[in-house]
Image: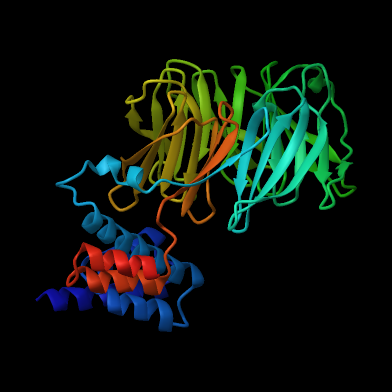
Amino acid sequence: MPYVIIIFTLLIFCQCLNNNAADLSLKKIAACTLVKNDALHGLFNIASNSPNLATEHREYIAQVAQQYATTLYLQNLYPIAQTNHNNILEKLQLTHAKNLSLHQIISIDCTDLYTQIIGTENGNLTLIKIDNKEFKIIQKLSLYPYLGPAKTITYHYPTNTLISYQDQESLKIGHVLPDGNYKSIPHVPTERLHGKINHITCNMDATFACSHCDGTVTIWKLNNQNVYECVQIIPVPKIPLLCAWKDLTTFACAETNCISIWRYQDSQFSCIQILPLHSSRITHLAWNHDGTILTSASDDLSLKFSRYNQLSSLYELALTIYDFEDFFTSVSWNKNYLVCGCMNHSIYIFENDELVQSIRRIGTLKSNNNCIMWGPDGSYLVTGSNEYKRVCFWNTYNKWTLAASYAVIKQFSSCNDQNIESQRTAE
């Protein structure tokens, strides 16, 4: 009977994948069902030998199998009966710490090869690039004087575009060139910039939004003459504290204790929803990878998750967590994993289960942190500390090859902990 169920599920799964109209969540459910029914061999064959499958489907099958293999391995290495589940990631933590001469670490961005850090040193804005394999500083650039706060500077890493603002000054926009030089990008000034800017953030095509203390949000785009110009001035009901882009056409704006969501339609951004969520000032906003969850952190010491409802086409509060003892320093998503840092030197890691639409805490790290960023594949975290003037790299043990994951699953049922540890070390 179990084999009949597995074969039936496999047929449904294949039908879902070959039906372009099928909802992606159904494909994910089918993939996870196959994995949990131990039909992994067939699953790997589908991923490897089906040329008609879209790349995104093959990648998702591989991702599900890898996550499942990692879970099995960790449960065997650290049995739940012997250790608190929240301590699993604590035992797999620091791999490297790099001391820096920066006075303030402003932002961190990670690629497959490098970790790039923006900060200040001796009153100058500084860019540091670290090699992820040898953890060596391979480039350090001193750019220009900057004494403003961290939230009024943003760096668009794909195009090396740096945007900053200091009180009583105009916007400063430019490219950081490979040779270390800085080239200014002209922009059309607007009288709105005579007021204070609370926050600046970029989307993927280097369009950026400025949150102003006069109750407006300005949207800036690069025109055909390679000049940045303000394309829209958006009045918001309350003072905008910060914005976060979901994608190229949608962003969320934190207005004191509520959140407004704006979408580009009919040639301009319009408000589509207001979420009254917090009882105090909102300090951080973060979208998950597909924009189905918006996370907000506040000075009321709560972390709230608003989930997209397909029936109403609106975001609804799904979960509130009050288990925090201090203010938040950073919030960052990588696919279905969220990390948030607090001023009491605690870093919390949460997992979103797409199948049952639940969020749970899976790990806690102890480290001083001012900003946190995931590695691009979620296999490591990078934390920056202003107090200790260093960045730390934390291995989350998710970067496994498909073959290595399958080998662990095969050995799981017949080998003891020591054999599995030898297998993992060999991989």
On the question of residue 104 being in view, the answer is yes
Residue nearer the viewer, 262 or 324: 324
Task: From the top left corner, tell me how far across and down residue 365 is, in percent.
Answer: 39, 37
Which quadrant holds the C terminus?
A: bottom left
Indicate whether 179 appears above or below 45.
above
4 is higher (above) or lower (below) than 398: below
Query: Is 200 in front, or is 191?
Result: 200
Image x and y of residue 366, in percent? 40, 33
Residue 288 appears in view: no
Q: Nearer the viewer, residue 93 or 42?
A: 93
Percent across and percent down for residue 266 are 67, 42
Name the outermost residue toward the left.
Answer: 1
Structure colour scheme: rainbow
- Judge left or right: residue 227 versus residue 19: right
In the image: residue 418, left or right of residue 309: left
- Left or right, 207 with reference to 367: right
10 on left or right of 254: left
Q: Position of residue 386 (x, y in %)?
A: 59, 28
Residue at screen point 37% across, 21% down = 325
Residue at 64% of width from left, 42% of height from top? Answer: 265
Question: Picture quarter containing residue 276?
Answer: top left
Give the residue displayed 72% in from the left and 45% down from the top: 206
Query: Split into 4 quadrants, where in the image is the N terminus?
Result: bottom left
Whether residue 74 is situated above or below residue 309 in the rendered picture: below
Q: Nearer the viewer, residue 336 or 98?
A: 98
